[in-house]
Amino acid sequence: MTDTTTALEPLVARLAETAPGLRVETGPGPTGLYAYDASNYRVPPRAVVFPRSADDVVEVLRACREERVPVTARGGGTSMAGNAVGPGVVLDFSRYMNRILDIDPVSLTARVEAGVILDSLRSATALHGLTFGPDPSSHSRCTLGGMIGNDACGNRSVRHGRTSSHIEALEIVTADGVRAVADRTGLRAADPNDRDAVERVARLEADVRRLIEANLAPIRTELGRIPRQVSGYQLHHLLPEHGFDVARALVGTEGSCAVVTAATVRLVATAQASTLLTLGYDDVVDAAEDVPEILRRHPTAVEGMDEAIVATMRARRGPDSVTGLPEGRAWLYVELDGDDQAAVDTRAAELLDVLKARGRMTGGRVVHSPAERRSLWRVREDGAGLAARLVDGGESWPGWEDAAVAPEDLAAYLRDFRKLLTAHGLTGVLYGHFGAGCVHVRIDFDLGTDSGRAATRRFLSEAAALVVEHGGTLSGEHGDGRARGELLEVMYSHRMIRAFAAFKEIFDPEGLLNPGVIVAPARLDADLALHTPSDVLPVETLFSFPHDEDGFAGAVRRCVGVGRCRSDAGGVMCPSYRATGEENDSTRGRARLLQEMVRGGTVQDGWRSTEVRDALDLCLSCKACSSDCPVGVDMATYKAEFLHQHYKGRVRPRSHYSLGWLPLTSKLVGYAARPVNALLRGPLGKLLARLGGVTTKRRIPAFASRRALRRALRTARTGEPARTLLFVDSFTRAFRPEVAGAASRVLADAGLPCTAEDDLCCGLTWVSTGQLSLARRIMARTVARLDNGDDRPIVVAEPSCAAALKRDVPELLGTDAARRVAARVHTLTGALTDLASPGWAPPELPDNVVLQTHCHEYATFKGRHPRDLLGRLGVRKVDEAEGCCGLAGNFGFEEQHYDTSMAVADLALKPRLDGIDPRTPAVVVADGFSCATQIDHLAGDRGIRALHLAELLDPAADRPGQPGENS
């Protein structure tokens, strides 16, 4: 092992000289972020480098070789076996080396840089009717380089196999900094005019050929036995009968032999027709028994999962988030494809009949709806995260998460594997690629104690022996990494292990590339993230974190690195990452730094940490991660708690006072709204904005008078007995009282007449700025008033305030009264969905609506979204801007956040507004005050105004004289 204690300064200085402009980061922030991947391991690097070209990689490797510093290549950081963490320099290819260099639809190939996201490649090739076959569940954020490193497969590996089957050539940099090309004919220098490089590469190839010739027998008998045999090095591709394919042999080496900078990959045609069957079973073993019969029908995919994953998805995203599954406690997804939809449907029906006759299923159905199929695949793709933190709060971990056997041996293996779990007192959540014999499982290991780690070692050793007994492999997809490298000796002969070591030594004689994996592996229980030092940060908090046994520490530990927050396709999180592309601005990056803060690792300043403060700075507190993150990370709450602790007893940023105290100041302004508005529109208004840390690039919204609110509510009175309570929040009261009037009329029209409470506050602005002590006092007053024996539903027109009452209030106060109040809270959408009279029909609605759903409503009120309500009420097309508007309460008004706010708006909202035809009146709906304000700002003088849902559904909307002026 290389000495990693060498001073880093000479390396940084050399890179500054040889690669000017190369981004090199050191210090607690970057090293804390990159100390983790999606595995159980924590290995802080000493520097993180972001190359922009292969030449940059050359300079890094040459400098690291001279200074004897290890190098670990990293893509999306989603590796589950500890493949993407290392003690020296981490090369992050995802930030800049993410270009698609060429697509050739004639030769069915594409040339891509290592950092290209799989979904980006698939989107580009789809224009030609092509795709890249392997499709891991992390397809929205994993990189091609990472897939090559692990020899990744995915859900459709029954049809498309492993990444290695789709590699034409690899462009690599060797450990000594030579650029070379590996393909089906061998290895050659990238520059044929560089005589030194040509000679060095020739020697390397010759050494490899000699190694293969000396080990033909073990390579032929021990490697390539089953479809998913990923463990070890794939030296069988170098056999004479396989044409000495160096490119394929380097796939799956986990960056331990060379650094891949680009690849030429083979593409496949996209199927013209497909369908999905969902099959229910009492048990995953029963499901596995049917797999051989299913495979006879040539499916594209055969995926399995157990009930724990489905239950967690429904708890996380609402009961309606998983539909289309038959009765059962385990399920198979079977996908069939072809050129003709009718023929595919016929095959599906025939297969269903055959399986019913076998008698193992509890039920089955063909899923025809594309939307329902997408929803079902989302459950399966989120399996790793959903299994990590289950409904009961239990935690589970990888480590033995992707062993594989031949598909015909799967049922027998699963039967014995579950016996092994029981014998060790462990519970595993099972899912995976059943059609390929590959089983993913997360297990409730105790990795935080010495006895638990010893027990884990014993289990893994016995599990390795068991899978080998069944003719299988330790890894069928994720690679060996730090989790299974030590166990390779259970699977392979000593001669094969020596051949692996010799292969690495040829490419990397000094052991600098990704040390600790496959060859000379680290102990599988070394560098565990849960091996927490005893002097961790005390975490007495104001938020109760009721769903996490260890409070704040347990809450931030929810992040296990699956990286869905780094996705730019589907869902709402994480707007700041989508805008900047920086790991520091992702939900995962922030959670990892908070974990470092709690453990006193690279971040040693505790709550006073500037690194954590800076990482949280661009968090918009949108709460989308609490819903979209498979493990339920709630960064908005963590940020509020951190800001409270960080600024305790200290002067806060100016905007925390000017915007955090807005409910109080706006209430006072309401008694003199007209002169204050005139003042704010003049030069003094800009001065006050600057003094308050507020951007002058936005127009400050006009305040409403108290008279306007009284008039709005007076015109809405019906005289009927009130069935609901309308909570008039601070934003509605201060800026758009007409919404309160419209909401009252809509509720009455829907059979839910209300009375209004217009003198209370949910405390949201104090929470979002981390002023939690004040927030609790305000919330306590509100709860005392609302918890008065009245059990009427509380309807809140402003989604962010509804979310605060629903979630923040009970988690900050922790009282039964707070929980009773929270249970009564509905958004207007929720009230009309769940409580409206059965015969209610609103006024005539437009055919098309552009919709901006508030992030807090999306995250907190699952399954009660305006899009669905509008569709049920007759709107034919709802063009939803999926994602944050970018204003996000105080965030977009703060001077230093204006540019990020606009960048977030550019992701979804602005394109929707720009797509509105100016010749056609457009109806834009946005219930959130922030969303409506951002829309007004983006629209400029185009005459676009966002309506609240209440205004759209208002039965009196076309009557003259309704209140609409904030004066």
Image (spheres, rainbow, N blue to C red):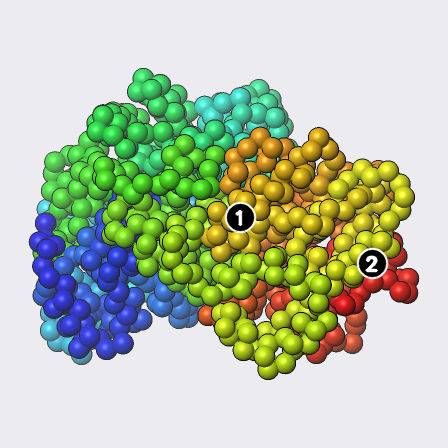
Can residue 279 be seen here? The reply is no
**Where is residue 701, by image quadrant?**
bottom right
- Residue type at mark 2 is Arg
Q: Which mark is residue 904?
A: none
Q: Residue at x 55, y 38 (%)?
A: 810
Kindly identify which residue carries mark 2: 711
* Mark 2 neighbour density, 10 Å: few (under 14) some (14–19) many (20 or more): some
Q: Residue at x 29, y 43 (%)?
A: 537
Residue 271 position, x and y percent, is 56, 52
Query: In the image shown, does 11 or 523 lie closer to the viewer?
Result: 11
Residue 540 position, x and y percent, is 37, 40
Residue 207 position, x and y percent, is 10, 56
Compared to residue 271, the image places residue 415 above or below, namely above
* Mark 1 neighbour density, 10 Å: few (under 14) some (14–19) many (20 or more): many
Compared to residue 923, the image places residue 751 above or below, namely above
Residue 96 position, x and y percent, is 36, 68
Q: Residue at x 65, y 66 (%)?
A: 933
Kindly identify which residue carries mark 1: 775
- Residue type at mark 1 is Ala
Query: In the image shown, does 813 or 95 lie closer to the viewer?
Result: 813
Query: In the image shown, does 427 or 851 lie closer to the viewer?
Result: 851
- What quarter of the picture does the C terminus occupy? bottom right
Q: Residue at x 83, y 58 (%)?
A: 711
Give the mark count: 2
Can residue 424 be seen here? The reply is yes
